[in-house]
Amino acid sequence: MKHATPPDRSHLSTEKRNPRTMGLDRASVEECVAMLQREDKEAVQAVKRAGKRLSRFISAAEPGFVAGGRLVYVGAGTSGRLGVLDASEAPPTFCVPPGRVVGIIAGGDGALRKSSEGAEDDARGAWAELAGLLLNGNDAVIAIAAGGTTPYALGVFEFCAGLTEGARPVTALLCCVQGEAPLGCDHVISLRTGPEALTGSTRLKAGTATKLALNTISTTLMVRSGRVYENLMVDVRATNDKLRDRAARIVATLTGLTRAECFALLDRAGGEVKTAVVMHRLGADGAGARARLDACGGRLGAALGGGS
């Protein structure tokens, strides 16, 4: 079977050869580790350089997210897996419903464990899942594509552009190359990581930078929507021993109670850290504490009388 000639991607910085790692195949273990670590530093710097672009996107997405909108990631391969990873970690960390941060990957959930790279060539591959979300103006959709050319990811912009004006989400392209915004894309977040240590292997620097950027986006939106108090994970969902321990330590930090007293208080609060703290600090019962938090939009600082 004869296949069509694919587009030439040799001009992309993520596909170029790295002159600093030309001797990778002859490197000792120590030299290989040193080479990779030297290149990894560039991933951190790339995210730092993109700080203003990240801030602009987050600022645009914030009002809708605070109002109940969703953050949706769409990608293939490593990019898709990183989006699904960030989405899956939001519920236990911030106690948000699973549908508030959504990861869509080419090839479906099976692609998380087994490569399904062929699915990335379908520009309309994510359309059915996007349609099922019934997107609206409070949502934000990020296409993740290291090289900025993946049809599966870029197809989200055509889909969103076809929605009625009030239903169009804020859109962004998160990539690791420099380029123009595709038609229908509101924001380009370019993490210029340069050539990989292993030519074209964007699971390396590009993947690391992408993970850092996704951490920044989701965590900042959670902070801005009141799911963090000081620097404490007060909306943690205590679903296992590690998280129950963390919840008790947070309550102890904010109340001064003993460890045993914290577990007893958490039990009365239904395992809810913020409810437990308000109960203790304001002398309220569980219902009263929840009512106070609801009146303050779930923001612990405001519920305790100290502002947001």
Image: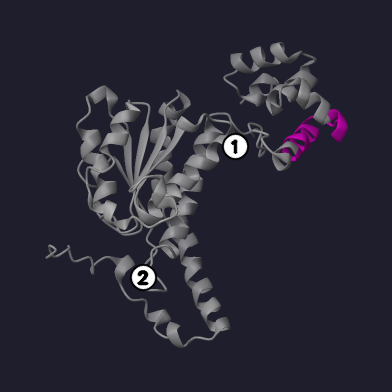
What is the magenta segment's predominant secondary structure? helix
Q: Secondary structure at mark 2?
A: loop
Which labelled disc corresponds to residue 195?
Answer: 2
Q: Quadrant of the N terminus?
A: bottom left
Q: In the image, is residue 22 above or below residue 88?
A: below
The percent coordinates of residue 219 (x first, y second) are 53, 41
Could you say which is closer to the camera, residue 91 or residue 43? 91
Q: Is residue 108 magenta?
A: no
The three-letter amino acid code for the residue at tag 1 is: Pro
Looking at the rendering, the stretch of residues picked out in magenta corresponds to 245-261
Q: Residue at coordinates 73% horizontally, 35% vertically from top-left?
A: 247
Write down the residue under mark 1.
92
Q: Amino acid at mark 2?
A: Pro
Camera-side residue of 7 and 161: 7
Residue at point 80% right, 34% down?
Answer: 252
215 vs 31: above or below: above
Looking at the image, residue 85 lies above or below residue 191 = above
Q: Is residue 233 left or right of residue 178?
A: right
**Colour pattern of the rendering:** one colour
Mark closest to the chain's N terminus, 1 or 2: 1
Residue lying at 84% horizontally and 32% vertically, measured from the top left:
256
Question: Which mark, residue 276?
Answer: none
